[in-house]
Image (cartoon, rainbow, N blue to C red):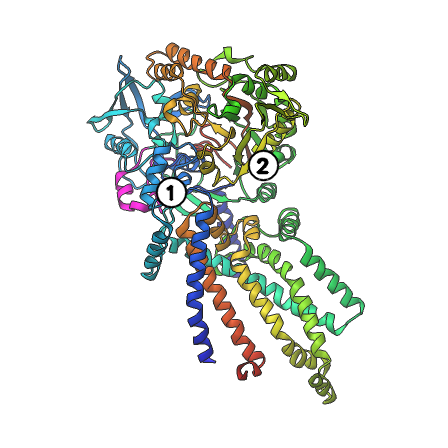
Amino acid sequence: MGQQIVHRLLISFPALLGVLFLCFCLLQVVPADPAMIIAGPDAKAETIAAIRLELGLDRSIPIQFFEYILRVLRGDLGRSIISNREVSEELAMTIGPTVELMLGAMLIAVPSGLALGTLAAVNRGRLADRVIMACSVAGVSMPVFFIGLILIQFVGYKWALLPFTGRTGPIWDGGLPSLILPAATLGLVLIGPIARLTRTAVLEVLGADFVRTARAKGLRETVVIIHHALRNAMIPVVTLIGLQAAFLLGGAVVTETMFSWPGVGRLAVGAIVSSDFPTAQGAIMILAIAFLSINLLVDVLYVYLDPRVQRR
Amino acid sequence: MIRTALSAALALCVTASASAQTLTMMKAIDAPHYDAQRTTWGPTSDIVNMFQDTLVALDWDGRTPVPYLAKSWTVSPDGKTYVFKLRDDVSFCSGKKFTAEDVIYSFKRLKDPALKGPFAWRAGTIKELRAPDPYTVEYELEEPFSELLLQLTMFTNVIHNKESVETLGKDYGIKGADGTGPWCFDNWQPRTEIVLKRHDAYKWGPSMYKNKGPVKFEKLVIKIVPEDSSRVAAMMAGQFDITHQFPAQFIAQAKGAPMLTVTEAKPNFQLLYFGFKTTRPMVADRRVREAMSIAINRAEIAKGILLGNADPAFTVVDPDALDFDASTNGVVKEDIERAKTLLDEAGWKLGSDGIREKDGVKLQPKVYYTQAGNTPRVAEAIQGYLRRIGVQWQLQPWDSTIAPAKMAEQDYEIWSVTVPYLSAGDLMNIYFDSRNIPTPNRMNWKDAETDEWLKKGRSALTEADRTKYYGLVQQKVTREHLWIPVLNINMHQVANKKIAGARPHMIYQNTFYKGLDVTR
């Protein structure tokens, strides 16, 4: 197992470098000029030209990339060319809220999705199954902003139960109420796919010999379902959860915007559209590392769920 | 048990009192930084005006400079030397006393080529700054600048503390910035919130405010809420006290909401216009430009798109602005038949597809604008009006971060911007001076007469002369139809009914200004 982790880590490094280089090149294609953004809309041409020169934007892309990589290897992610703030500081400010949001959403989505999917599988063809699957399809089909708006309109505004404009602090420092609505928005979107996949996987397993054997041994049905069926059905579900978790780290931009949540997604998108290369690269690097780490974690979980994976 | 209940009650009282001492505000977008000398961005100006001060303040009428850090001033007969007498009771948030040295440092920094201050011109062409004593500044110009006092009210010209600038270095305006304003910079989390705290020593509020200081709240928390519907719901739910960025389409709803007060900033000089790049053959002919300008229905656009939150603009300068030239009224007369005649006279004949053409070229100008605010819908409406006269606008919206770069490429006939300004002279000097080609003079308008009048307006020694020359420029650019003035955009402040004394100021868009009279 340890060897497998080391191997995965080794192949992750060139992947990370490749991601960074591709993103660096793609950012050059965006026709925005950070010098113009820094100077503002009414700045004169000579002012803009002077800022470009100072930022080193007149140099070739390979040179700019090479210098960037050298700095990163020294642990220096540079400064935002828009705000002049240290990129590492910008990232430090946004990673916490992003992880909070991701964990909050998963905390809502994973248990609910697993429970509903299993319930639907066990009650296959019955009313409960149909209702759960209809709700899942509705959940999958509804755009995230729609769910967010509904929650804001009712829970935030009409019933005034929870705040919905920004993070009020870390969850251990009074920030929990502000986390609930954005996490619920993302969580509700994820329940559907997890429930559907869980249902399919559990249905497959329910017909397997070992489940029949467990029943024949006289085990209670809940034990059969949870310990025997669900655990063996988890591999595709864990893959999906891993992918969704990784996606949530950087792809929750709409939710972050709606709820003014200061996450990495908003930081990355803002940096990309304003050609703030150091910030965009820093955010992308963090997201790539998170993606690779989650994939690694999923691989480890495979082994836990099904020891045959390691033997293979 | 009783002790626990009492503790809980006390905690609740403390929390309630803390929130009563905090004023909460919402903004739609954050600024890249809060160093006023390094940018032209409105989102920077709004906050900077809260924690830093200028030598002179701008009165509510939007045209009268009133004493602020400078308690009085005199101007030499040649208009080149201003002597400012400074207040001797002013201190920075850090506790440092404010003196003439701070004024001299601030303007020297602004004019330092290394800083690349895009609005440095607003301080005039400074020849020398002298401090004969700690509370007197002699401000000598290379040439007279008739609008200097007005321009000194702008956020670019706020006074900085040298120690703060030098200590913070590259983090100045990011991690902090010292100022003499009624609020002090506390902390900033980009794209999330900026927190200002009360400047307890502040007592030098300008004459326009009843309260000379300090402000009535301990803290001012400004949250960035980019989503329109979230801002509307948050104000309606009472989660915030005040915002100047309430979506225009919901203003009517806010006016009807029992818990909200809507106040319009009056006056407010903010023009949505479409400009013609006169060096492009398709729009080089004045008749073509005029035809497009008079073929639209501004009143319908104001009512239908802005839902009454804008006034039709028939002149380049707002009639309430300083040095507005009344003779420009009536130059733009909406008349679709005349528009068609003008295009016929200019040689653009209707083609079989309903689009005019000349020498094999279709009258299909490329129109660039920013995909934000009201401009896209206004552009689409104008596109519809112009089809009736055989003109087909090719609309090309750009993201706001890309728009300046695309506009700098010069590959278009028409563009649109919504511009805030201080006065006729301010607007004319920025946009019509040939020295500002290609940006912000995107018309590429190079006219010796215009340049000469602008120069004379700038160096005028009397109000009458300044008004005269800026009037001449307005007449010329209006007659030439270099712009299609479309709408004078209204600005609204939406506040919770519990908030009193909040009056929106017109200076440079969406501004709370000093907020000295605001109470709960």
State the extent of the magenta-drawn residues as a range.
B159-182
Q: Identify the secondary structure beneath mark 1.
A: strand
Q: Amino acid at mark 1?
A: Phe
Residue B268 appears at what percent x and percent y? Answer: 50, 25
Asked whether B438 or A80 is in front, the reply is: B438
The lab-note entry on whether marks 1 and 2 share a chain reads yes
Residue at the farthest right position: A126
Q: Is residue A159 left or right of residue B181?
A: right
Task: Give the crowd class for mark 1: few <14, some 14-19, many >=20 residues within 10 Å.
Answer: many
Q: Residue A138, labelled with which disc? A: none
CA gap, disc 1 and disc 2? 27 Å
Task: Give the crowd class for mark 2: few <14, some 14-19, many >=20 residues within 10 Å.
Answer: some
Residue B101 appears at what percent x and percent y? Answer: 23, 32
Q: Which of the two labelled residues, at mark 1 and mark 2, occupies the earlier sequence position?
A: 1
Q: Identify the secondary structure beneath mark 2.
A: loop
Residue B81 appears at what percent x and percent y? Answer: 25, 19
